[in-house]
Amino acid sequence: MTEIEKTLENNGIRPTAMRILIYKFMAKKEVAIALTDIENAFVKAERTTLYRTLKTFEDKGIVHHIDDGTGISKYALCEQGCNCELDQDLHLHFHCSNCDKTVCLTDHKIPHINLPSGYIAEDANLVITGICEKCSGQ
Amino acid sequence: MTEIEKTLENNGIRPTAMRILIYKFMAKKEVAIALTDIENAFVKAERTTLYRTLKTFEDKGIVHHIDDGTGISKYALCEQGCNCELDQDLHLHFHCSNCDKTVCLTDHKIPHINLPSGYIAEDANLVITGICEKCSGQ
DNA sequence: CCAATAAATGCACGTCCATTGCACTCTTAT
DNA sequence: ATAAGAGTGCAATGGACGTGCATTTATTGG
Ligand SMILES: [Mn+2]
Ligand SMILES: [Mn+2]
Ligand SMILES: [Zn+2]
Ligand SMILES: [Zn+2]
């Protein structure tokens, strides 16, 4: 049994061929991926299967869902020890307006915000839009 | 000529009956509004007209568009002296998971974030989700 | 190993909201 | 008054997400 299979099983996910492939695909990407990205990478696979695979990964807590404001859901594998299910790994995300890629800035946590009294925060989403390091050429 | 008509004209918007009505509607609301909200308030009006009115208001800089993560676009009248067109009025938004309302917290600016080198920030969106003061009853 | 059962996949369809094309109407300028 | 321009109404499109159900594949336990 490979490392990936172990990871999946440890999280209550049966390691089917498709799931292993998708996991590998996500693991080697350094950016957040959209359903379409996977669809293009696995043309033989059915969109629904890919969709539900991402859903399963998310439900079981090995990927987190990213809303980068583009209207297209992105996903990224969670880091070791990520507590995003508990809304406790609130790192920010960067979306490049040039190449349209979105990245997790996992060590840039969302700063704590003092809300007006009466407001109770449960979750937070911070997306910075701009030019990524690759596109800025710096 | 009323105050509202002046405001519209000053921003290059011809003050039609519909536009004045929508402006008034937004002005008396303390929360961000969705197209559907206007639609429900003006049942006789066409959805497209309302849609394009919001678009015009946004283009001319008297309304800002809010992405609260619900997938439904919200809009709010800009404050006096708002520079949101220049991405320089980056206040945060609060979305209540109970009553589904979204509010501008105009005096809670998004804190400055130090990005990794090479990344150039152009815009930022911070949405806090939780329970609003009305729903929390505090 | 085989049957019974459960899980995963494939296909088709539906939904929701945003957006556009085009014709018609109203306003403004000459 | 006429022409040009801006606004509006109606119909249709499109993209992305989501679901119901039949079929296939994997697991279990005899
Ligand atoms: Mn995570
Ligand atoms: Mn504004
Ligand atoms: Zn880029
Ligand atoms: Zn509320």
Image: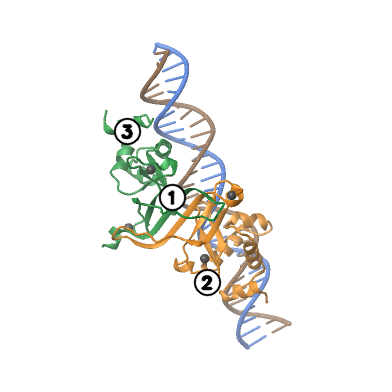
Chain colours: A orange, B green, C brown, D blue
Please give the chain letter of the residue carrying mark 3.
B
Residue type highlighted by circle 3: Thr
Residue type highlighted by circle 2: Gly
Q: Quadrant of the N terminus of chain B?
A: top left
The answer to whether one can see residue A70 in this image is no
The answer to whether one can see residue B37 in this image is yes
Task: Give the percent coordinates (x, y) of residue B62.
Answer: 37, 38
Total residue callouts? 3
User: Secondary structure under badge 2?
Assistant: loop
Please tell me whether residue B7 is drawn above or below residue A39 in the rendered image: above
On residue A81, the disc is: 2
Provide the residue designation for mark 3: B7
Provide the residue designation for mark 1: B67
Q: Which of A92 and D2 is in front in this view?
A: A92
Q: Nearer the viewer, mark 2 or mark 3?
A: 2
User: Secondary structure under badge 1?
Assistant: loop
